[in-house]
Amino acid sequence: MIALKAHDIEVHVVDMNAARIAAWNSDQLPIYEPGLDEVVKERRGKNLFFSTDVHAMIKAADIIFVAVNTPTKTYGVGAGRAADLRFIESVARTIAEVATTPKIIVEKSTIPVKTAETIKDILAENTRGVSFQVLSNPEFLAEGTAIVDLQNPDRVLVGGERTPGGEKAIQTLVDVYARWVPRERIVTTNLWSSELSKLVANAFLAQRISSINSISALCEVTGADVDEVANAIGKDSRIGPKFLKASVGFGGSCFQKDILNLAYLCEHFGLPEVSAYWESVVKINDWQKHRFASRIVRALFNTVADKKIAVLGFAFKKDTNDTRESPAIAVCRDLLAEQARVSVYDPKVPSEEVRQDILAGVENTRLEIMPSAYEACAGAHALAVVTEWDEFKQLDFQKIYDAMAKPAFVFDGRNILNLTELEKIGFRAHGIGK
């Protein structure tokens, strides 16, 4: 986006993964995101470049955005909760080793508060008198709408040290964004406020999803409609309508990881009650995924053994091919554990990725990945919508019904279908919180 909006600024995207860089230089980008192809094709080779020449680009750069992965630790202290910062530290050491001129280092990765201290310590101890300023500039993009979010952001957050050097660095980055973002939407804070704001924003958004999902279960047993409840409470200006859409559960690379990280930080700083509160948000989300699969089993006369279940959608949300923490993974695993035959269709996720995410390398002949929704549903006893792809709203459900085993069930995990119309066709239709 910087390359698109500021033609006089050279942007070099570098990675040690040669295959990934080759994909960025090809017509088949490694990430599916609406509008991304057009931006890359317009500026690639002009002021936007992709290469593996990490050292040369570090030397040449004035500003270095650090955008490496910060997954949840799977080992040692904080395993399953704390962020794994090995890649952040590795980048800091590489910069310290290679840089010969002053740099502004910008944290783009989602990281625990106080990570900038680590980066500054490594740079200070390993450089030869080169001056560095470390800024925090977290992303608030949503996959599927990232290009729109970048072009017209709610806010851009830049945190830095409140020193003359820090203030100058902040202004330098603010001037870049000000090429297209109104100045009043560019928020500046100290380093720690900026780092913490990203974690807290994701935690608050995820908390709203888990809250409405917990109410969806109550709606199902009382006869209330969760969409009507959400609409009623969303009219309250203190609450608002956003992120009150009940579903099979949230996924993606951010929410679970960041909440667990926040919970770990709270515990680390002696706040176990706060930690337990935020961990409950993740637990409700996991429970909602398993509850959805259990509801399918119960409705199909308490057994799905040898029955075919079509799962429509595998990405964690529409308009992306990202499957990280996708609810579909848990749903498919639960159904396979019940001896069901599971047939998956997703318009953007490659079949091998679906297979690997579900089975983790262990072959299971009851899982199949199909090239269309109609083929996935043919002969199925039930279909489950797990991702809210727009194309699923346009399907010919009469055609699907005619090709399914009877009674034919629909389980709408995203509440995007008209259940009344499906019931007129002959389906036994179920929604979340309905």
Image (cartoon, rainbow, N blue to C red):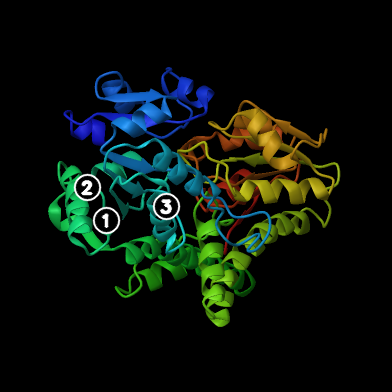
Q: How many C-alpha atoms fall within 10 Å of the one at disc 3: few (<14), some, or many (≥20)?
A: few
Q: Which residue is mark 2?
A: 173
Q: Nearer the viewer, residue 3 or 127?
A: 127
Q: Residue at (50%, 29%) from the top-left corner? A: 16
Could you say whether the residue bearing mark 3 is in a helix, strand or loop? Answer: helix
CA distance separating discs 1 and 3: 25 Å
Badge 3 amino acid = Glu
CA distance separating discs 1 and 2: 8 Å
Mark 1 or mark 3, which has the lower sequence index? 3
Residue 112 vs 66, above or below: the answer is below
79 left or right of 390 in image: right
Could you say whether the residue bearing mark 1 is in a helix, strand or loop? Answer: strand
Q: Residue at (85%, 45%) from the top-left corner? A: 339
In the rendered image, which quarter contains the N terminus? top left
In the rendered image, which quarter contains the C terminus? bottom right
Badge 2 amino acid = Leu
Mark 1 or mark 2, which has the lower sequence index? 1
Q: Name the front one of labels 2 and 3.
A: 3
Q: Is residue 243 visible?
A: no
Q: Name the front one of labels 1 and 3.
A: 3
CA distance separating discs 2 and 3: 25 Å
x and y, in percent, of residue 15 in the image: 46, 31
Q: Which residue is mark 3?
A: 125
Q: In the image, which disc is placed on residue 293? A: none
Q: In the image, which disc is placed on residue 158? A: 1
Q: How many C-alpha atoms fall within 10 Å of the one at disc 1: few (<14), some, or many (≥20)?
A: many
Tell me, yes or no, whether the two marked residues, 1 and 2, touch with CB atoms within 8 Å: yes
Mark 2 or mark 3, which has the lower sequence index? 3
Badge 1 amino acid = Val
Residue 355 vs 328, above or below: the answer is above
